[in-house]
Image: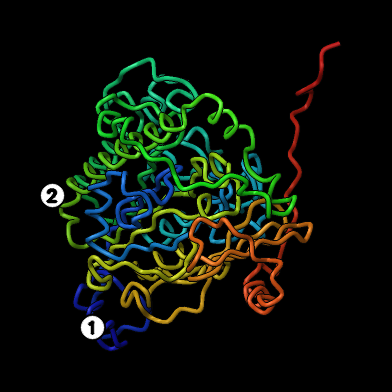
Amino acid sequence: MKRRQFMQAVVGLGAVSFWPGRIRAAAKVSKPTVLFIAIDDLNHWVGYTGRNPQTRTPNIDRLSKMGVSFSNAHCAAPACEPTRAALFSGMRPSTTGCYLNGHSWKKHVPEGVSLNATFRKAGYYVAGMGKTYHSSAARGMPAVYASGWDEYPPLPKPSTGGAQKYQGYHTPLPLDMKDQDLGDWHTTDFCIEQLKKKRDKPLFLACGLTKPHLPWAVPRKYYKMFPRDKIKLPPHIKGDLDDVPPAGKRIGVRTDHPRFLKSGRWKDAVQSYLATIAYTDMNVGRLLDALEKSRHAGKTVIVLWGDHGWHLGEKERWRKFTLWEEATRAPLIWVVPGVSKAGAICKRPVDFMSIYPTLCEAAGVDIPKHVEGKSLRSLLADPDASWDGAAVCTHGYMNHAVRTERWRYIRYADGGEELYDHDKDPYEHKNLAGDPALAKTKNDLAAHLPKKNVKSKPKTRKKGGNKKKK
């Protein structure tokens, strides 16, 4: 889409301004509603990526058909706390020092810089519920951060439904439950009610869905969608880590895979994960139904994202916490009325640092100077547009991965390297970092590595806490 055509579409909508302050044709440009859907631990096992044909996500696929879906989208960090801190602050982990779970975002991100605070300052009514930041309730946020929200009630029910963390993962599921027994149902209910209310301010609505985070315990009807005898394991090879440097072998959770091989419950875990994704997809469908029936229909900017990927045995790992494809890649879907191309798939490499600036531009909100990400405006208008960006993911101090359309390059703090050619090796089985013919390729990819790498603030211990009794 040419610039003039793009601007005409924006002004014609009367709700979206991708060049704040530059469009003068319309006497009044109203603010669009923003629906911000965050999903915890959802990897790229959704329909539009084609990564796993076993998955069933009709409602996420329905959203995908409404806008532009990114098939090569990656988190800023492969863990809940740092990736959310980066997305909401607009600053990379290497800038804030929030690298890992346990590096409290509250200590690394200054007050007032967050995405929700920026929209509130711009005149939006900002409401949310569930897991958006690395916390599922307002009580999990100190009062100093509450100013970033107009409304953020705690969950009326826990997100676990009473299940233990590893039920459906390491152990059989001993209980049945109803959809309403899980916190995500009530988060979705809250968001549906917000869409029904009339206000004199535009609405920024954050829906933080916790599933498919552990425990993988959902009503049995979702397990029945995936018969165990038809479950196929993810692609894997024996000795996958033989050509990985020592730092790569140390990364991630190393105890789970031997446990699954010994127990024979690998297929059960895959079944549980697929079932839990299906439960989350149901709630996404409820939310989309409510939006379509509301006064916000047709004038809402929607962004759906999974906070990072998830291993299920690939490269002998489970969970997140690595810099390989399965831990960094996650869904990213955009709907911007009058701008985004319906049903389009974009293969360009992007990371979630793009969400903050893109939302600001879509709503006509000035992008704060501290924001480091690159807007996706050109790719929403034309998913095949040229793109010189790369996705960058960080796990711990000085450990980074760079993902382009063809390559993944990893460099660890100790200098260890990995290089994978995704045109030939989509599951990253062969490390090419030692090939001298690819030295220039590595150098080109290394140019995308963060220039700034601050150390994390040390954890503070409460006075008198964690002392051994004599």
Residue 348 rendering spot, x and y as whole percentages: 43, 71
Quarter of the C terminus within the rendering = top right
Residue 302 marker: none
Q: Nearer the viewer, residue 255 or 457?
A: 255
Relative to residue 420, is residue 137 depicted above or below? Answer: above
Quarter of the N terminus within the rendering = bottom left
Figure quadrant of residue 464: top right
Secondary structure beneath disc 2? helix
Relative to residue 413, is residue 405 depicted above or below? Answer: below
Residue 407 rendering spot, x and y as whole percentages: 55, 68
Horizontally, is 441 left or right of 386 in the view? right
Residue at position x 60%, y 54% from top? 323
Residue at position x 46%, y 48% from top? 235
Proximity of marks 1 and 2: CB atoms separated by less than 8 Å? no
Residue 152 rendering spot, x and y as whole percentages: 40, 40
Q: In this view of the protein, can residue 298 be seen by the observer? A: yes
Q: Nearer the viewer, residue 250 or 192?
A: 250
Give the residue type at disc 2.
Lys
Which residue is label 2 attached to? 293
Residue at position x 33%, y 56% from top? 50
Q: Nearer the viewer, residue 116 or 96?
A: 96
Horizontally, is 358 left or right of 406 in the view? left
Secondary structure beneath disc 1? helix
Which residue is label 1 attached to? 8
Relative to residue 304, is residue 343 depicted above or below? Answer: below
User: Which residue is the extreme one toward the front?
Assistant: 238
10 Å crowding of disc 1: few (<14), some (14-19), many (20+): some
10 Å crowding of disc 2: few (<14), some (14-19), many (20+): few
Q: CA distance from mark 1 to mark 2?
A: 27 Å
User: Which residue is the extreme one toward the left?
Assistant: 293
